[in-house]
Image (tube, rainbow, N blue to C red):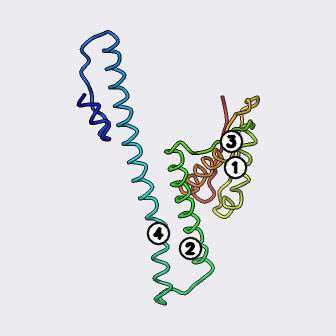
Amino acid sequence: KDATVEIARGRFGKQVKVRSKDEMGELAISFNQMSLDLERATQARRQMTADIAHDLRSPLSVLTGYAEALSDGKLAGTPEIYEILHQETNHLSRLVEDLRLLSLADAGELPLLLQSISPQALLERTIARHTVTAGQHGIKLRVVIEPGLPEVKVDVERILQVLDNLILNAFRYTPSSGEVTLAGSK
């Protein structure tokens, strides 16, 4: 009873003693597994929240630094500076949107529109969305698809968001004149 009260209060991970191998013992085992799963999910959510908070600090610091320098006259506005401010604002907007989507998913309210699409079409669409940015960074993009892959049933817009995040991360860690490959195989 004490473990159930603790879980009801939001203190997950509590265990009960398994004293038999009958239905009550099976119930105790299931309870313990549920308690551990809740604890892991809670820890993952806390870590994700901490990661997002950390990720928000970076564009905010850049924006604040440039805004202060421009405001104090220590820095003259140039197209390059305005482009940096624009990029950081977009980065911040993406993070806030990620947080909103996480909140919807957590509440079980994230709508999914499942559609069939070929992996090749999905990856080529992703490449098309990032060709200009890749060119600006001197990065080559390419798609490598194993022939004969079946269509996948996904929420195209949501999976494109995932692929966008992967591409943007790849851009951060790929040197100029580097290459990013999106590949699909069985």
**How far, Cα to Cα, is label 4 from label 1?**
27 Å
Instruction: Classify mark 1: helix, strand or loop.
Output: helix
Amino acid tagged 2: Leu
How far apart, in angstroms, are the residues tagged by discs 1 and 2? 25 Å
* Mark earlier in primary sequence (1, 3): 3
Circle nearer the N terminus (1, 2):
2
Q: Of marks 2 and 3, which one's residue comes earlier in the chain? A: 2
Residue identified by numbered label 3: 113
Q: Nearer the viewer, residue 179 or 63?
A: 63
Mark 3 surroundings: few (<14), some (14-19) or many (≥20) residues within 10 A:
few
Residue 126, numbered label: 1
Task: Please name the residue that numbered disc 4 is placed on.
Answer: 60
Type of amino acid at the residue the image marks with label 1: Thr
Q: Are marks 1 and 2 in contact (CB under 8 Å)?
A: no
Q: In which quadrant will I find the C terminus?
A: top right
CA distance separating discs 4 and 2: 10 Å
CB contact under 8 Å: marks 2 and 3 = no
